[in-house]
Image (cartoon, grey):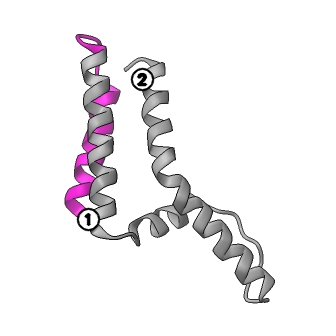
Amino acid sequence: MPLSALEYLANEWSILLDPSWIAIKKDIQARAEEGRGVADYIDINGVMSFFLSQSAREIEQAHNKMLEVVEFIQDLTGGLDTTIQDRVAVVFQSFAKAA
């Protein structure tokens, strides 16, 4: 997978995760302001927890979007080495089955 394709994939995934990142950031800030915690580092596990708290329909839409992105990249790369691309595609496909 060319670096540009991997960057495109990562960008599309970050767009889907951005609302969850914003939600956890607001939650952490609110807890700190209420004295229920200290402003904390936002890690990917926290973002994913917020992401996974969405409705099944929203998660399925995100999954379908990422499968479209993977398919688009596969079409674009043609006969190039797809080792990384195949591994990334398995992550999105496996994630949907587990959710």
Determine the secondary structure under disc 1.
loop
Is residue 96 toward the left or the right of residue 42 in the image?
A: left
Name the residue carrying label 1.
99
Determine the secondary structure under disc 2.
helix
Q: Which mark is residue 5?
A: 2
Measured along the vertical axis of the image, is residue 63 above or below residue 21? above
Give the camera-side residue of 67 and 44.
67
Q: Main secondary structure of the magenta part?
A: helix
Q: Amino acid at mark 2?
A: Ala
Residue lying at 49% horizontally and 54% vertically, measured from the top left: 17
Residue 30 painted magenta: no
Residue 48 locus on image (x, y percent) = 46, 62
Furthest residue in direction top, as rendered:
79
Residue 92 locus on image (x, y percent) = 29, 47
- Chain-order first, disc 2 or disc 1: 2
Residue 42 locus on image (x, y percent) = 64, 62
Residue 80 painted magenta: yes
Viewport quadrant of the C terminus: bottom left
Residue lying at 72% horizontally and 80% vertically, measured from the top left: 30
Residue 23 is at least partly visible in this image = yes
Q: Real-space Cα distance between discs 2 and 1?
A: 26 Å
Q: Which residues are magenta?
A: 77-99
Viewport quadrant of the N terminus: top left
Residue 34, by quadrant, is bottom right
Residue lying at 46% horizontally and 69% vertically, measured from the top left: 49
Sort mark 1 into few (<14), some (14-19) or many (20+) by Cα contacts within 10 Å.
Answer: few
